[in-house]
Amino acid sequence: MDKTTPATKNVLASNPELEQSLVLARSGAMELNVLMEKADKLQREGMVDAAILLYQNWTTHTKSVLLHVACYNLGTLLGSRNRHAEAEKIYTTALALSPTFTQARLNLGHQLEHLGRLEEALGEWRKVFEDKSLDRANPAVLELILHALNNSARLLETQRRLAESQALMRQSLMLKAGQGDVIQHYVHIRQKQCDWPVYQGVGNVTHNQLLVGTSLLAMLSASDDPALQLMAAQRFVHEKVIAYKDRPLHELATARQPRRGRIKIGYLSGDLCMHAVGLLTPELFELHDRDRFEVYAFCWSREDGTAQRARILGAMDHHVRLAGVDDLTAARLIAEAGIDILVDLQGLTSGARPNILAYRPAPIQVSYLGLPGTSALPGVDWIIADRFVMPPEYLPYCTERPIYLPNCYQVSDRQREVGPAPSREQYGLPENGFVYCSFNNNHKFNEEVFASWMRILEQVPGSVLWLLADNEWAKANMLRVAAEHNVLEERLIFAPRAAPPDYLARFALADLFLDTFPYNAGTTASDCLWMGTPILTRSGRSYISRMAGSLLSAVGLPDLITFSLPEYESRAVQLGQNPARIESYKRYLREQGRSSALFDIPTVVRDLEHEFERMALDQRRGDQAGA
């Protein structure tokens, strides 16, 4: 049945031409090209529902050999209006009329995905890329096949069916090498599975294409070269971020309403929930001096229903929900709130919305925590740092200028809930053997570091390595590499994921945390030191490879920082062979760790506020002088 919305009824009442078109569409005498012209005109005028109604009238009353084409166009419009169930039915009709109509089958898959029928969506796409009758030599047909392969791979990856996803990416790249988006996912999915070497050739894809196609997140694990990290960030910005050339939104807002009163800090993030950033930041928000600062959350975080989410929102003076709000409108909301300093807690990590920052809704925009390194984002001029994570030699590779805190850059939470103390037996750990651990995400692991860990185990009899296994393929690949180093399977012990309190409690069972390189532990390092377990890290040239070193300096254990692979490996062996030294580190952390500069969160917040206040007042004076 044709659906006439109230808005469309109003348009019909005032638009005799549209009414005439509908009458003609119902007559069966309107040619398809005329229908398409009239529908296109309605779309350009913003009358999409009217265009849908026109197509519905035509398809219901017209006999035509091209009916499947009209059904396809109608399905596209219905999908654009999120009327996915209706779109599914009309695409099914199009395919019944023309079973080889590949474009309709692809779009049917998308509607099924929107409806949550994921296996059916995959099935429709599979019919396309497994169809041997399709002419792969035809460029237009090849693009349809690639569309089916790439969307299947994307959906499988979101379902954590990583091996299946990677296999389809390989098929896609074998058919066409120069697909930057596919290469990006191919590299990172290999990292997630510890499928080394990560830069494994496929088809005609060159090593250079693999390197250039590496995302910034993947590059942070792949290379300590700050120039390559900057390149990856700049490529993203070039491809995904708008080049906003109009007057900055904050200037327009200030011209209407000059900034005065308390300094307004806005935190911009999609991770203010049960996430690494959400676990680090609650005290930062709670400890802001409300006599001097007013605190806003501008966020699109998932409503996960956790106490952590509730605590974060409870610490805010204002919460502006940006989920479902387009980037320009979001930026205008920030500008109209009169925000002095906008702190981006996301960077270029998953779920980022960098175009909000490109509109420059605040006069001072600062990067913090979410991306420990340069984002190259236009509009982000500053990054919170300390002099360990950002030494002078790193600055040429960073588009942001540092705001140096006196001690450690990282804020954390002293109110972390800790679960009951577990036993080694509970986790299958040896009662007396030396337990190395690394609870970093598996994509931070790389071939060089893992091989080093195997050499360490070989030199410390009875020792084990306690790891997280993000997925079954990562576990299998790690066990395979261990066997190649003659390390028995039972010396690798895999911990399951656990709720944050239980995850924190089990740190006490380990003797020494072995950090990853170049992607150091961040939140995990803070958790580990808070729980009194020492970390051995390797610091390099980039911000991300110096995070744990910054934490160790602030907690008072700089001798656990190494600066080369041989030094890291040698120190790990020495400590594994000297449990008494490990016990002295643990005793120090028990007695003095939590009172160290690392966990003096009130002072960290005051230091941060000092810098924010200085910058904001300077900006306000400049605004007044220019008025």
Image (cartoon, helix red, strand yellow):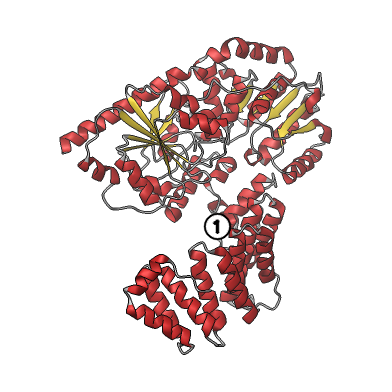
Q: Nearer the viewer, residue 186 or 487?
A: 186
Q: Secondary structure at mark 1?
A: helix
Q: Looking at the picture, does residue 336 appear above or below residue 541?
A: below
Which residue is rendered at x = 31% and y = 34% of the image? 340
Q: Quadrant of the C terminus?
A: top left
Q: Residue 210 at what x, y percent from top left? A: 58, 54
Q: Would you say residue 230 is visible in this rendering?
A: yes
Q: Quadrant of residue 47?
A: bottom left
Q: Residue 311 at what x, y percent from top left? A: 51, 29
Q: Nearer the viewer, residue 263 or 53?
A: 53
Q: Looking at the picture, does residue 234 appear above or below residue 306?
A: below
Q: Looking at the image, which residue sits at the far bottom?
A: 29
Relative side of 281 to 9, left or right = right
Q: Quadrant of residue 219?
A: top right
Q: How many marks?
A: 1
Q: Residue 94 at what x, y percent from top left? A: 60, 77
Which residue is rendered at x = 55% and y = 31% of the image? 308
Q: Nearer the viewer, residue 339 or 3?
A: 3
| Residue that badge 1 annotates | 181
